[in-house]
């Protein structure tokens, strides 16, 4: 793979790689470092990239693995960075509603973090990064039916936990 092909195939997915790294690491600087490491590894091994069916799937898998390795590192400090958090801070939103939204976002984040790793990863790829089922299949090696089941279970678990936490009657 030459420089032009690298720019054409790899650089457009930088944003996705960064968001994925930030999803795992919860820190902007660490996510940037992880993304740079992945890009450097891809560039270093660019001659072998043509042998892969999907270079993007490879890049996503590399990012995930690198982030998980960093999370397991005993030297890693626990830091949370919510600078990427988007909330409705328009003038038309009341302070009460703003607080309610912020609380709900925090709760959803906590509930997502409680999901098993596989469910959390599939949910992120599908609902945040908006990958197709075929792309997720290429990234994870799971069948589309398995992906659908995992995604459905993750969403159901989130829904039930959210309702339970907010003490709403489920009506069942």
Image (spheres, rainbow, N blue to C red):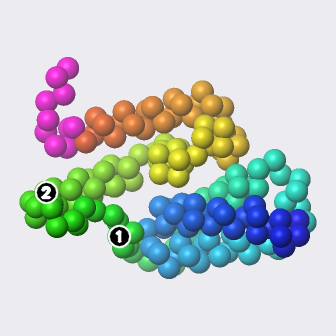
Q: Are marks 1 and 2 in contact (CB under 8 Å)?
A: no
Query: Residue 35 placed where, x, y %?
Result: 62, 71
Q: Secondary structure at mark 2?
A: helix
Q: Residue pushed farthest top?
A: 172
Residue designated by label 1: 82
Q: Give the spatial CA distance, label 1 vs label 2.
A: 19 Å
Question: Residue 97: in sight, yes or no?
Answer: yes
Query: Residue 139 placed where, x, y %?
Result: 67, 47
Nearest to the observer: residue 6 or residue 122:
6
Look at the image and give the residue range highlighted in magenta.
163-172
Please check the rendered image and state whether residue 27 is part of the magenta-colored stretch, yes or no.
Answer: no
Quarter of the rendering containing residue 67: bottom right
**At 49% from the left edge and 66% from the top edge, which residue is drawn?**
22
Pair 1/2: label in front: 2
Quarter of the rendering containing residue 166: top left
Query: Residue 56 placed where, x, y %?
Result: 71, 55
**At 59% from the left edge and 78% from the top edge, which residue is drawn?**
33
Q: Could you tell me which quadrant the N terminus lies in?
A: bottom right
Residue designated by label 2: 97
Query: Residue 117 placed where, x, y %?
Result: 50, 49
Q: Could you tell me which quadrant the C terminus lies in?
A: top left
Is the residue 158 above or below the residue 86 in the image?
above
In the picture, measured across the screen, residue 48 lies left or right of residue 35, that is right
**At 57% from the left edge and 60% from the top edge, which residue is drawn?**
16
């Amino acid at each position: 793979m030459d420089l032009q092909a690298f720019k054409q195939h790899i650089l457009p997915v930088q944003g996705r790689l960064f968001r994925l790294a930030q999803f795992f690491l919860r820190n902007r600087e660490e996510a940037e470092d992880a993304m740079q490491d992945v890009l450097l590894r891809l560039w270093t091994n660019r001659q072998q990239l043509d042998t892969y069916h999907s270079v993007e799937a490879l890049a996503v898998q590399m990012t995930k693995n690198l982030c998980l390795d960093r999370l397991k590192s005993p030297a890693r400090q626990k830091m949370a960075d919510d600078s990427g958090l988007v909330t409705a801070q328009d003038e038309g939103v009341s302070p009460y509603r703003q607080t309610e939204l912020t609380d709900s976002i925090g709760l959803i984040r906590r509930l997502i973090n409680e999901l098993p790793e596989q469910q959390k990863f599939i949910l992120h790829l599908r609902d945040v990064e908006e990958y197709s089922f075929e792309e997720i299949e290429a990234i994870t090696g799971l069948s589309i039916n398995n992906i659908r089941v995992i995604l459905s279970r993750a969403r159901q678990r989130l829904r039930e936990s959210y309702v339970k936490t907010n003490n709403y009657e489920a009506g069942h």
